[in-house]
Image (spheres, coloured by chain):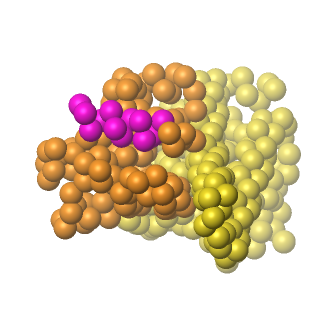
Chain colours: A orange, B yellow
Amino acid sequence: MKVLLVDDEKELVTTLAERLNLRGVEAQWATSAEEALNRLQTESFDVAVLDVKMPKVDGLLLKKQIQERCPATKFIFVTGHGSSLDFETGASEVGRDYYLVKPLKIEVLIAKIKEALQR
Amino acid sequence: MAHLDGIGRSGVQFFGKMSASISHDLKNVLAVINENAGLLDDLCLMAGKGKPLDPGRLKRLAEEVKNQIRRGDRIITYMNTFAHSADSESVAIDLRELLGLLVELSSRHASMRGVRLEIDRSSDAVTITTSPFVLLNLLWRCLDYAMAAAGPGKTVELGAEKTADGARLRFRKLEGMDAAAGSFPAEPEGSLGRALSAEIRLDPGTRELAVSLPGKGQGE
């Protein structure tokens, strides 16, 4: 399975990609929507893990742009929102099952990636 | 706390927005530290299975954790300064320091909007006596307008200068001012301005927004 991680926190996505790769998940990363869309010109991904809040183009808009190019890609959203109210608000927008809060637990992320692939 | 009575909803909204933004930034710091610690764990597990540890890789991970701790410390320091800004009704404020705090507090909002913030440090430092929280609240609303008026990919320049009867704070390079015109300044800004006896003026000629504050502005 091939996963694209998109978050404007470069240290976060690079380290997370390395950890996923160590676990046999082929992960690549981008730090902006523009960079992510550039990657999609030459390759496709089974799952995209998107930060909800990013400069210029947020995760929700990026999802639509990726879907136009790669309709088969599945999505997981990640957020830095801290409270349960924030979680409920965000989860209602993107779906509770595929909405994770930072800091991430890698086992949970991998389980969600596998679940997303079976959707 | 009487100085806060008149600003009601605006003050609470301001405090809430800043707190949410700060908590978001701190979550990101923790998330990066979490991944670095996780990778250290992974490398140790692999070392246990016979794969040698790379000291250079370990050093880079330790450096990144230290970087994030410095970042977190800076966020908490300005958060603390912001929290204490509501303590006093009237204190002497170095306006350039206050602009520095405003830029730190607004950096996430600016980044989300693709706007850069720069402080013009070419003029002399100027100090004025007023309510720091109410002034920050007013300046944040002005900056919110200034970022919309500058537009994505642009820079807003902030500066402070002494005037004959006080001090002036400026938001410059608002190239998209005409398109952003309309409801600014509105009642929240008016109410904050009255609380500080400040005057808010938009100048389409020079593409700037100025806030004039009365009082004994003291230059260096």
Quadrant assignment for the N terminus of chain B: top right
Indicate the quadrant where residue B173 lies: bottom left
**Residue at 44% across, 58% down:** A21
**Residue at 83% across, 35% down:** B87
Instruction: Indicate left or right for B164 with B202 as reference.
Output: right
Q: Can residue B215 be seen at all in this image of the molecule?
A: no
Where is residue B107 drawn, in percent x and y?
56, 55
Relative to residue B119, is residue B4 depicted above or below? above
Instruction: Indicate left or right for B100 with B114 as reference.
Output: right
Where is residue A48 drawn, in percent x and y?
31, 48
Q: Can residue B109 be seen at all in this image of the molecule?
A: yes
Q: Which range is magenta?
A: A108-119
Relative to residue B26, is residue B116 depicted above or below? below
Quadrant assignment for the C terminus of chain B: bottom right
Where is residue B11 drawn, in percent x and y?
64, 30
**Residue at 37% across, 26% down:** A97
Where is residue B103 drawn, in percent x and y?
62, 57
Nearer to me, A114 or B90: A114
Nearer to me, A68 or B22: A68
**Residue at 48% across, 26% down:** A87
Most distant residue in the front direction? B50
So how many labels did they put on this image?
Answer: 0
Nearer to me, B196 or B145: B145
Asked if the stretch drawn in magenta spans residue B91, the answer is no
Secondary structure mainly formed by the magenta segment = helix
Asked if the stretch drawn in magenta spans residue A116, the answer is yes
